[in-house]
Amino acid sequence: MSSFDTDVPVLLLRLDPNPFHHGTLGAVRSLGRAGIEVHAVVESARGPVGRSRYLHRTHELPSGPMTHTPLLALLRDISERIGRPAVLIPMDDRGAIAAARLAGPLLGRFLLPAQPPGLPERVADKAELAQLCRELELPHPATALPGSAQQAADAAAGLGLPVVAKWSRPWLLTGMADSGLRSTTLVRTPDDARRLYELTERAGSALLLQRLLPSAPDTDWFFHGCFTRGGGCLIGGTGRKERAWPPRTGQTAVGRWLPNPEVERAALRLARHLGYRGILDLDFRRDAHGRYHLLDFNPRPGAQFRLFTDRSGLDVVRALHLDLTGRTVPAPRGVHGRLFRAENYALLSSVATAFTRRPRAVTAGRPAGARGGRHGVERAWFAADDPLPFLSMTGSWLRSGARKSAHRMRAGAPRLARPVPARPLGAPQQP
């Protein structure tokens, strides 16, 4: 492993107020263990991430809408507190889009990948992503972009119910939890599609309807990578989602690093075509014909990025720091079979699966030595050298779950359509 420039700190930026975002904790630990000073913009210093021994300082998000002007002022203020240029790593889509927009005014204060103008916003936009896949002839679920409520109803019926409804710019929903809107919804009737379209103004972006690709064991895959100038891949890997929360539709609860040449070729081709630089997280689902459809493009680290940690400890956030500080990034040495487990979501997924009759995920073909050994399992929360985030998460998570259950029991109101978490169907999480 090349030596890090530990004089250059890191600021992790997350604008989505999610105290249980284990990807942020993973970045804190990875960089902190390398001797790098880590700062983080989070919703509260009292959350699980703020308890990590590897976090130098938290910078809390102020209340109110975090638009262009207040965010620029916040980042400039944090830069003054840090006292020297820092690598800026957004941990959610909204942060990645904002950082790219502010790259010019932040020049000299923060180190950022030099992206083509507007690229993070383009790839995170679901409508733009569908168009990009058509241009490159990459498999993508059949998608309709209705222009009226009646067109939405007709498109839903034409695609074949149920269909997946998505808001094209889901990051605009951040901070709108009381609106009842979700970035992705499973629509079961044409009338549901019609009523959902009527909420377009509230959502702030266009409604897309997509053909549902059924979930089955071994169908959901993801690619995480870090790219340098010209789309050159510094480190990358393909993983299979083995458990999700909610089951079959939500973020990765358990994932495994396994080779998938078809997914890797699609990811590398896409990055080269875009001239992408920095970290990305792609989600794929295999259809009944064996084709891998690109469902989601996240221009930042995925929550389970630590799955793809090679034998020397290199991962995407370490590779980005080395690249932006002018250090050599060594050739990665993959660890196929390595397992990632988000303890809280894995527990929920296991309990839910135990009460259904669906078959467990297929494990045939698992590489020898996939379990055990010091490279065998990466846990999202528990770490022997940093136990407080796990303890904090456990207490907060149980309290949060109890409050939500009580609220649902009191409300008992019918929903427009069954919601899917704020990730596209089959995608791995972040918030």
Image (cartoon, rainbow, N blue to C red):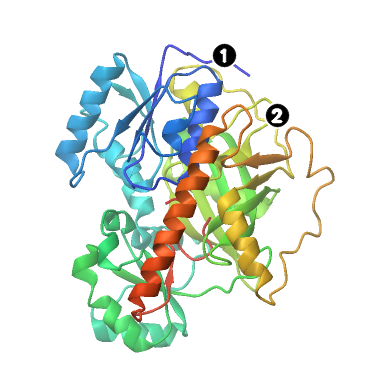
Whether residue 165 is visible here, answered yes or no, is no
Q: On screen, 431 above or below 100?
A: below
Q: Point out residue 108 in the picture as x, y percentages from the top left corner.
A: 27, 19
Q: How far apart are marks 1 and 2 (CA)?
A: 16 Å
Does label 1 or label 2 sit earlier along the sequence?
1
Q: Point out residue 341 in the picture as x, y percentages from the top left corner.
A: 63, 48
Work out which quarter of the rendered image holds the N terminus and state it. top right
- At a point 16% along the width and 37% down the height, the residue shown is 70
Q: On screen, 149 above or below 100?
A: below
Q: Which of 381 and 364 is in front in this view?
A: 381
Few, some or many residues within 10 Å of mark 2 (<14, 14–19, 20+) = some
Q: Nearer the viewer, residue 24 or 231?
A: 24
Q: Point out residue 344 in the picture as x, y percentages from the top left corner.
A: 56, 52
Which mark, residue 117? none
Instruction: State the residue position of label 2.
Output: 311
Left or right of residue 338, residue 21 in this image: left
- At a point 70% along the width and 48% down the height, the residue shown is 259
Q: Point out residue 117 in the picture as x, y percentages from the top left corner.
A: 29, 40
Q: What residue type is labelled 2?
A: Arg
Res 134 quadrant in image: bottom left
Left or right of residue 161, residue 169 in this image: left
Whether residue 85 is visible here, answered yes or no, is yes
Q: Residue reaching furthest top?
A: 7
- At a point 54% along the width and 39% down the height, the residue shown is 390
Res 86 quadrant in image: top left
Which mark, residue 3? 1
Looking at the rendered structure, the secondary structure element under dot 1 is loop
Q: Which amino acid does label 1 sit on?
A: Ser
Looking at the rendered structure, the secondary structure element under dot 2 is loop
Q: Nearer the viewer, residue 257 or 399?
A: 399
- At a point 35% along the width and 59% down the height, the residue shown is 128
Few, some or many residues within 10 Å of mark 1 (<14, 14–19, 20+) = few
